[in-house]
Image (tube, grey):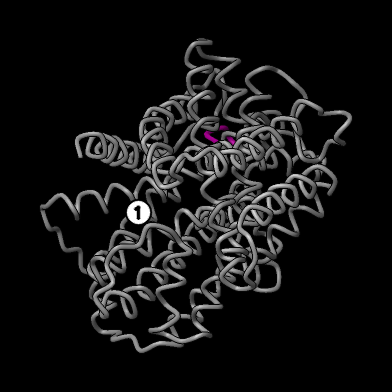
Amino acid sequence: MSNNAEAPPEPDYVPPPAGLLKALGPGLITGAADDDPSGIATYSQVGAQFGYSMGWVMVFSYPLMAVTQQISAEIGSVTGAGIAQNLRLHYPRWLLRAVVLVLLVANVANLGADLGAMAQALQLLTGGPVAPFTVAFGVLCVVLEVFLSYRRYAEVLKWLTLSLFSYVAVVFAVHVPWGEALRGALLPTLTFDTDHAEALVAVLGTTISPYLFFWQAAEEVEEQLRRTIKPLYVAPAESGPELKRIRTDTWVGMGYSNLISLFIIIATAATLHVQGITDIQTSAQAATALRPIAGEFCFAVFAIGILGTGLLAVPVLAGSAAYAVCEAAGWVEGLDRKWYDARAFYGTIAFATLAGEVLNFTGIDPIKALYWSAVLNGLLSAPLMVTMLVIATNRAIIGDFVLSRRMRVWGWLAALVMAAASIGFLVL
């Protein structure tokens, strides 16, 4: 978004190295949460099945993902309200209800798959039964969200993003033909068959997910409350540095996310693919398959990474559902609230997490649940992206903070790509 009102020119904002980590927040956490255990399974399957040849998808999707997340973040920062609240205030109720319902169902399915994957990873590392681990992880995540202040919880989540470096360690612990890996990342190769089409759709659907839109917009509102600053619509004088901080945070965060995804593809291509192991259904299967090929170190690091990313992603999935539900209903919400001041908000977090846990004990195939979660996310992504673009160009909502022409072009391109991916997913 750009402020078209007359104002003195702002100096270019480039965070110094010492201040870069401080500038990173919602964007970094959102990007890292995108590499959840379910996403790890998808990227592992792509690397195992196709080797290095589809690494380019992560490079291609990076600007589309970053622009989409920047739009959602700026909507929150400019209006002081999340995506669902903007829908409630300015658009038909049927649209709001449909979006929130689909998001809630998809998030619960994703939560179930992630909690199950974390439990399986811990079982691989320590032995013991999966069921108690599943319950324990769910309870731990809920307790942290409910009883830690937003400031401290945001710091916990920020440090958990470092767990993604485990996949970088795996890559440098095995032999990688870097020439081939770089060609796969930088030179797109299109193969027109069902397997490649399914993989392309799965990666795009995993990378650009609706729950990330809701989370990052809501976290920008939380940041304003924490720093006691007003929405930019009300205080346009603050817009220059604030919008530049958001751009830095978002593009670094999404770049970190996609780079780690690329490393997961490279790691599994260098180990599983070359050994003829081409069918990976879960992240735990990927870790198990690594053990006899890459050794105990790579196996353990890969499994530990699943735990770290799960502890990061589960709160984001449950939190985004809670923000959407409470914003839609007009209830008090926010991680900076005490539990007794926002019972519905924290109750939704607990409900979504518990429902995800229950899926692991119902006999429902977690892979099928995740598949249908991807279907729902795919169906929701493109319409929601279009809705965000409409919000971001509506002066009645955001005043002079309309999207620049460049942002509009990239935003519509991202929406069209996701629409094509969604149609392809349904056809396949």
Residue 396, percent from left and from top? 55, 17
- Is residue 219 something that shows in the picture? yes
- Say which residue appears at 65% left-offset and 70% top-offset: 16
- Say which residue appears at 76% left-offset and 25% top-offset: 344
Which residue in the protein does label 1 denote? 61
Give the mark count.
Answer: 1
Q: Amino acid at mark 1?
A: Ser
Under tag 1, what secondary structure? helix
The boundaries of the magenta stretch are: 1-6
Query: In which quarter of the view is residue 281 placed?
Result: bottom left
Relative horizontal placement of residue 140, taking residue 281 as reference (left or right): right
Magenta span dominant secondary structure: loop
Relative horizontal placement of residue 202, taking residue 91 as reference (left or right): left
Query: In which quarter of the view is residue 229 placed?
Result: top right
Q: Residue furthest left?
A: 192
185, 130: nearer the viewer: 130
Looking at the figure, which quarter contains the C terminus? top left
Relative horizontal placement of residue 304, taking residue 35 as reference (left or right): right
Depicted 286 relative to depicted 105: above or below: below
- Say which residue appears at 53% left-offset and 16% top-offset: 97
Residue 159, percent from left and from top? 70, 65
Badge 1: how crowded within 10 Å, few (<14), some, or many (20+)?
A: some
- Is residue 1 something that shows in the picture? no
Depicted 141 relative to depicted 330: above or below: below
Q: Is residue 3 magenta?
A: yes
Residue 223, percent from left and from top? 73, 44
289, 389: nearer the viewer: 289
Depicted 62 relative to depicted 94: above or below: below
- Say which residue appears at 60% left-offset and 46% top-offset: 243
Q: Is residue 334 magenta?
A: no
